[in-house]
Image: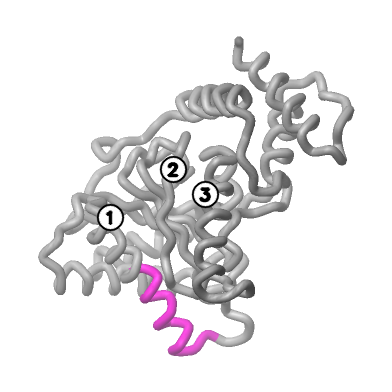
Amino acid sequence: MSQEQQLDFLISSFLEESGEYHGAQIPESLPEKRRILRSLMNIRIPGKMNDKVQVVQDSYLQSRIEANGVVRLADIPIIKDNISIWQGDITRLAVDAIVNAANSQMLGCFIPMHTCIDNCIHTFAGVQLRWECHNKMIQLRKKYGKDYEQPTAVPMLTEAYNLPAKKVIHIVGPIVQENLNPALETDLASCYWNTLEMCRENGLKSVAFCCISTGVFHFPNKRAAEIAVATINKWFSENNYRMERVIFNVFKDEDRRYYGEILDAS
């Protein structure tokens, strides 16, 4: 199949599976087809995928990621003490683990075409990622009760499926509802610390952190960067386990500037 034939096949398969949108018209243009497929993936409830559809989905996503350009550690310069800043799409990074800013349900973003990192990671990993997260949450609810939600700063490790990274570490950051306070700052520091602990425990030597909590969770960007850098430096100073690389993955120019200034001063 060509990539467009794969796209048509996947849209038809997801539409047929969805029930609500079964029989909907497939658009003609390639950008619209891609939008429809991503939207259908975003709204799909957790569930095992048909084997044939999964093979086509995996081939299609991997070809899209290759076309976007895979970025390897050798492509990213070290700024200081095995720490890097990289601005761009985290789904392009071929590292041991990328960090996903998750919500407490741990199932990804269900809003079609939403621009959050949770949506992006789940889209390009494939629907297997939501299925794995769902099964992990089932096990946690058996242990802690049916109303269990993932607490702030407690990481969850999953496979990365079609992403160039080996693993995804999902973590719920603190939500700033009114004013920033020391408890929220401590929670954010714990997100970074606990993620590094998970890397150590699982032999992961390179990790790319997104800007945890700075989006819809409203943590001030500069303060978040200060906490991130300080926590990484403290963890390095207290642990013999040395990471090959810690990458601060940023999207905005503002965040790139903050991390650059803070690392220069540290």
Q: Residues within 10 Å of mark 1 (few under 14, many from 20)?
A: many
Give the label, 1 or 2, closer to the camera.
2
State the residue at coordinates (36%, 52%). Answer: 208
**Number of marks:** 3
Q: Which residue is mark 3?
A: 132
* Residue 79 can be seen in this image: no
State the residue at coordinates (53%, 28%). Answer: 58
Give the label, 3 or 1, closer to the camera.
3
Q: Secondary structure under badge 2?
A: loop
Q: Earlier in the sequence, mark 3 or mark 2?
A: 3
Report the disc number at residue 246: 1
Report the disc number at residue 44: none
State the residue at coordinates (50%, 23%). Answer: 63
* Residue 167 belongs to the span the image colors magenta: no
Specify start and end residues of the magenta stretch as a single range.
180-192
Q: Which residue is mark 2?
A: 160
The secondary structure that dominates the magenta segment is helix
Q: CA distance from mark 3 to mark 2?
A: 10 Å
Q: CA distance from mark 1 to mark 2?
A: 18 Å
Q: Residues within 10 Å of mark 3 (few under 14, many from 20)?
A: some
Q: Earlier in the sequence, mark 1 or mark 2?
A: 2
* Residue 185 belongs to the span the image colors magenta: yes
Task: From this view, report whether residue 44 is shown above or below residue 225.
Answer: above
Would you say 228 lies left or right of 202 here?
right
Measured as percent of width and height from the top left, residue 129 is found at 53, 45
